[in-house]
Structures are given as structure tokens and as C-alpha cells.
Amino acid sequence: MPQRDPNSEKTFDFVVNKGNGVKGLVDTGIETVPELYIVPVEERFEPNEISTHGQGSIPVIDVSDWDDPKVTESICEAAGKWGCFQIINHGVPSEVLDAVKESAHRFFGLPKEERSKYWPENSPTDTVVLKTSFAPQADCF
């Protein structure tokens, strides 16, 4: 059985539980990628093993008609098979999308203490919270 890195739990605690994120880890000046973030060689995909589901690229979904049941089907299928997809004809101006990306960069550039105001236990509202989208502890520990 592979030996677990004794620093993995500390790294996980620093990044996830203490809310520093990967950016906080980088800001510490680390020079190597922690083992927690390295997929063992024997578990890595080879480029020729990655399935494109016959499509050859990430699915592109036209949502110009949200009422079309095929939109929902396409989103569910792409999410299930690919885990990601591109949406087109959503009606959101590119300037708004650019502003959202810029806001995200500014937010994640804030000190941890400022971002922590939006953790679920601290947020003044139920509609604005900062969460991770996955539970790495289920996979790692």
C-alpha cells in the first residue's frame, strides 16, 4: 500500500479548511507541487486513452431556445459524459462576462480574512457564499 504524505493533511487543512485556497499555498512561496495535487503516474490518462465521445471536442450547446427540451437533455448529457460544456447564444454580453471574470480575479486576490466573510458560516446572506465545488477530503483522506 502506498505511503501517505504526512504533509497532505496539513496542506489540505491550510488550503480548504482554513480557506487559503491554492492561491494562498502559492503565496507561501512553495517551490514544488504538494503530493496531494499529484496524480500517481500509474493513474494518469494517456492522451490516446482520453475519450472524446465521438465528438472530438467539448460539447457546444445552443441555448437560444431554453424551452426546447433538447437543451436540458444536452446539458445533462454533456455534464455527465464530459463534466463541462460551452454554452452559446445565452444572451449575456461579452462585456458582462469579462466584468464577472475581472471581479472573480479581484475577489480571489483579496486577503483570506476578507474572503472569509463569505464562507457559509459567516455570510450575512444565504444567497452569497464562498464554497468549494468538490469534497477533496472524500478522495484524499
Image (tube, rainbow, N blue to C red):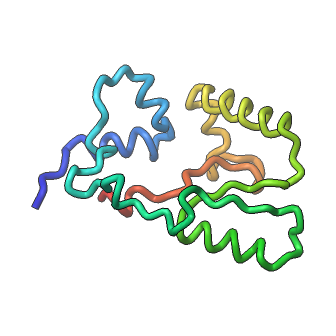
As drawn, is 91 to the left or to the right of 127? right
Residue 32 vertical position relative to residue 13 in the rendered view, above or below: above
Locate the C terminus and report the quarter of the image it occupies.
bottom left
Query: In this view, which residue lies farthest toward the left?
Result: 1
As drawn, is 11 to the left or to the right of 61? left
Instruction: State the image coordinates of residue 81 (x, y, percent, origin top left).
Output: 53, 70
As drawn, is 44 to the left or to the right of 92? left
The residue under the point 61% across, 26% down is 109
Residue 118 sits in quarter: top right
The residue under the point 29% across, 45% down is 38
Residue 41 vertical position relative to residue 84 in the rendered view, above or below: above
Query: In this view, which residue lies farthest toward the top?
Result: 29
Towards the viewer: 81 or 30: 81
Towards the viewer: 105 or 19: 105
Number of numbered labels in the structure image:
0
Residue 135 vertical position relative to residue 41 in the rendered view, above or below: below
As drawn, is 84 to the left or to the right of 69? left
The residue under the point 77% across, 77% down is 70
Instruction: State the image coordinates of residue 62 (x, y, percent, origin top left).
Output: 79, 61
Instruction: State the image coordinates of residue 46 (x, y, percent, origin top left).
Output: 30, 54
Locate the N terminus and report the quarter of the image it occupies.
bottom left
The residue under the point 29% across, 37% down is 34
Instruction: State the image coordinates of residue 12 (x, y, percent, origin top left).
Output: 37, 45
